[in-house]
Amino acid sequence: MTMRRFLHLGIVLSVLLTGCGGTAGEDDGAGEAGEDPQARAEIEQRLEEYLPVLATAYETGEIERLRPYAVERVMAQVEKRVSDLAGSGMVLEAELQGLVLEKVHAWGNDFAMVTALETWDLRHYSTGSRTLVSERLGTRNRVQYQLKKIGGRWMIFHRALEQEFDEPS
């Protein structure tokens, strides 16, 4: 097992184990995990900066814009999705309408697991003609993030859609 995989497994196990004793965001009294107001504010600001850049990357295909915010693996995932869309003759235009951090569970001063509720206006256009193919306004998604502080900045280590709500609010 590589050191990177071992570290990732350790992060996941740590989250699972610390989450078993109470709700996310609760401090276990040991000071190792829980709600850290400073980390929460930094992470919220970071995601507010990242998500519009993510939207631009989907629309333009300029994945390199994500580098200051996300690790290589996350960039590769976005690149694959953009490529899949292009392969089907479409481009996605996304506009962030709202971000609410539901849970922030930080530990060790440089790891965090975040659950966020994101609201997006999504428009799919055909490549070339820019003909509107579909439009979903007010789409709400619950998204799970893993973040790691690298060089003093929170970096998106993993992003996964947990739940997509059927009815926009």
Image: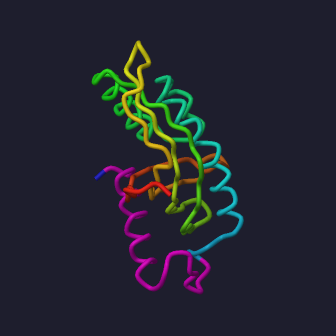
Give the vertical position of 37 relative to 76 (above or below). Answer: below
Query: Looking at this view, is 6 or 137 the one in front?
Result: 137
Q: Position of residue 87 (x, y in %)?
A: 29, 22
Instruction: Name the residue rendered at 51%, 42% in the picture.
Output: 121
Instruction: Name the residue rendered at 52%, 59% in the picture.
Output: 116
The image quarter in which residue 44 lies: bottom right
The image quarter in which residue 126 lies: top left
Q: Position of residue 11 (x, y in %)?
A: 43, 63
Instruction: Name the residue rendered at 46%, 54% in the picture.
Output: 168
The image quarter in which residue 49 lies: top right
Q: Which residues are magenta?
A: 2-31
Q: Position of residue 119 (x, y in %)?
A: 52, 51
Q: Going by the image, does 45 lie left or right of 145? A: right
Answer whether residue 163 is magenta in the image: no
Q: Main SS type for the magenta part?
A: helix
Give the vertical position of 42 relative to 23 (above or below). Answer: above
Query: Looking at this view, is 95 or 43 the one in front?
Result: 95
Query: Looking at this view, is 96 or 111 the one in front?
Result: 96
Instruction: Name the residue rendered at 28%, 24% in the picture.
Output: 88
Q: Going by the image, does 15 lie left or right of 80? A: right
Q: How many marks?
A: 0
Q: Going by the image, does 104 lie left or right of 9? A: right
Give the vertical position of 83 relative to 99 (above or below). Answer: above
